[in-house]
Amino acid sequence: MVDTGAIRTVIGVIGNVISFCLFMSPVPTFISIWKSKSVQNFKPDPYIATILNCGMWSIYGMPFVTEDNTLVVTINGFGFFLEIFYALIFFVYSTWSKRRKIILIFLGELVFLAVVIFLIMTFLHSAKQRKVIVGPICIVFNILMYFAPLTVMRQVIRTKSVKYMPFLLSFANFANGVIWTTYALLKWDPFIVIPNGIGTVSGLVQLILYAMYYRTTKWDEEIDSV
């Protein structure tokens, strides 16, 4: 008889590996930013959105909210600090107007996470109650993370160029959505299935756009981001 628990653990480990690759996929982008000492036309939106998403999923995976979700905590805890590092690089090489935006959003995210933890630990006294509150919040922010590249996708369609939509990030988003959807289906968890199912579609759309506009991309030209 198939042990779904063991299979789920294996899928979760694979999910951690793919999520690790997702978090590391922007490295070439940030090397380019570091070398040019400019963020160019790259956008910080996906990285800022992912900070809050990882923070919420780290809370969701804690034993005081859900059971048997250690693999959710480990990868999202890693992602939380890595995305902060990415945002810091954006901050260093951005103009002041963009720096101010990054600071305000980041501080707002930290305050939000602190408030959520305070409220659920103070007013909710069982893991089941906390899950019902934290789960829907996680769905919202996970969807925001997957759709943060919408601004980039719009730019791709307008300019017919994929220069500022990194392929590795798009592919990793797609694979990440697929594996975590599978993980949640093995032990039904709608709070993981819903956002990652949507993430699968979002990643697929990005890959389709990449295939459509790769040939028309002029890699040596600067593109107006307006």
Image: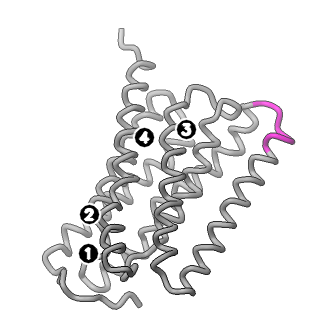
Instruction: Please name the residue shown 27% across and 88% down the image.
Output: 222
Q: Is residue 214 left or right of residue 49?
A: left
User: Mark 1 = which residue?
Assistant: 162
| Residue farthest left in this picture | 215
User: Mark 3 = which residue?
Assistant: 73
Q: Residue 167 — which label?
A: 2
Q: Secondary structure at mark 4?
A: helix
- Chain-order first, disc 3 or disc 4: 3
Tag 1–tag 2 contact (CB < 8 Å)? yes
Q: Is residue 106 left or right of residue 176?
A: right
Cα separation between marks 4 and 1: 27 Å
Cα separation between marks 2 and 4: 20 Å
With respect to residue 55, does 103 lie above or below?
below
- Chain-order first, disc 3 or disc 1: 3
Instruction: Please name the residue shown 75% across and 46% down the image.
Output: 117
Residue 177: x and y, percent? 39, 48
Instruction: Please name the residue shown 46% across and 65% down the image.
Output: 46
Q: Secondary structure at mark 2?
A: helix
Is residue 79 located in the magenta-colored stretch of the structure?
no
Residue 63: x and y, percent? 66, 30
In the depicted view, which residue is nearer to us: 182 or 96?
A: 96
Cα separation between marks 1 and 2: 8 Å
- Chain-order first, disc 2 or disc 3: 3
Cα separation between marks 3 and 1: 33 Å
Q: Residues within 10 Å of mark 3 (few under 14, many from 20)?
A: many
Q: Residue 180 — which label?
A: 4
* Residue type (three-letter) at the residue carrying disc 3: Val
Q: Secondary structure at mark 1?
A: loop
